[in-house]
Amino acid sequence: MAATIGRFIIEYFRWIKGIALLFYNILYWIFVGPFKGKAAHRQSIFQQMVFVGLHSVVIVFFVDIFTGIVMAMQTAYQLQRMGAVLYVASLVAVSLCRELSPVLTALVVAGRAGSAIAAELGTMKVTEQIEALETMAINPIRFLAVPRFLALAIMLPCLTVLGNISGIIGGFIVGTGSLHINPDLYMQTTFKYLELKDIYTGLIKAIVFGILIAIICCYEGLYTKGGAEGVGRATTRSVVASFIAVILADCVITGIFFFSKS
């Protein structure tokens, strides 16, 4: 038992070390590479932005609009008892922008795009395509990891904004349709209590989530071992680790903003 726990701890810290080293190398190629004439290919970055962002628009829209609908119904159930049903608008908007939209969007992107990144890079690793890049003097981190890192860091906040809007629309549908709140009054209440801090808190979370998902999925893909079975294990690990990292980071960032008020 003790030996098993010891091996787990050693593997965990080895994994953390690998993640940190990959993050350092990615930052090096982003900020130092261009000055050495070895910037990441813009076309690759754009292709990854389309894959991560544009191809995730529909699922993010539906996830967040239904989340807004459910949020409105659940909060209305409690607020109707206190005669404060109008505050459904503000509760839905603030909850979505600060918490639900960034987290749900990150989980959707990790499950959809993150798993695909890990599987693609893992397949390239086990079929020796990455070794072929190194043979041609092409750094695989600059060529493969940097475009995916930038795409996730840029597009996840954009998808979060879409999630905010679609979630508010979902709350608006319930508020004006089922709760019979005046549409103008609903929107006035939304923007009266929704502050700029609520929005940028969610966007900061989205950037951090995008960075974490990119590093974890790229690491699992680039260092896959064990053939086709290893690709499957790496893909599973990347999604599970991304989910855990997103939840932990959300807790930490929320705590920082909460305690910074006092």
Image: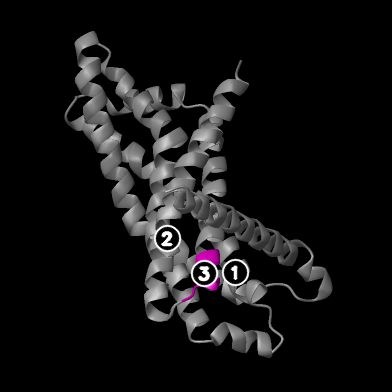
Residues rendered magenta in the picture: 218-225
Whether residue 172 is visible, yes or no, is no
Q: Which residue is mark 2?
A: 237
Q: Which residue is mark 1?
A: 145
**Considering depth in this image, is 66 or 152 the residue closer to the camera?**
152
Camera-near label (2 vs 3) is: 2
State whether residue 237 is above or below residue 71.
below
Mark closer to the chain start, 1 or 3: 3
Residue 192 position in % (x across, y down): 45, 22
Q: Which residue is mark 3?
A: 48
Mark closer to the chain start, 2 or 3: 3
Q: Secondary structure at mark 2?
A: helix
For the residues marked 2 and 3, what is the alpha-carbon distance in whole angstroms? 21 Å
| Residues marked 1 and 3 touching at CB (< 8 Å) | no
Residue 177 is left or right of residue 113, and the answer is left
Residue lying furthest left in this view?
Answer: 178
Residue lying furthest front in this view?
Answer: 2
**Considering depth in this image, is 126 or 58 the residue closer to the camera?**
126
Q: Residue at x 19, y 11 (%)?
A: 81
Quarter holding residue 176? top left
**Considering depth in this image, is 245 or 10 the residue closer to the camera?**
10
The chief SS type of the magenta part is helix
Camera-near label (2 vs 1) is: 2
Q: Residue at x 26, y 43 (%)?
A: 66
Camera-near label (1 vs 3) is: 1
**How many badges with numbers are in the image?**
3
Q: Secondary structure at mark 1?
A: helix
Q: Residue at x 59, y 29 (%)?
A: 256
For the residues marked 2 and 1, what is the alpha-carbon distance in whole angstroms? 18 Å
Mark 3: few/some/many CA within 10 Å (<14, 14-19, 20+):
many
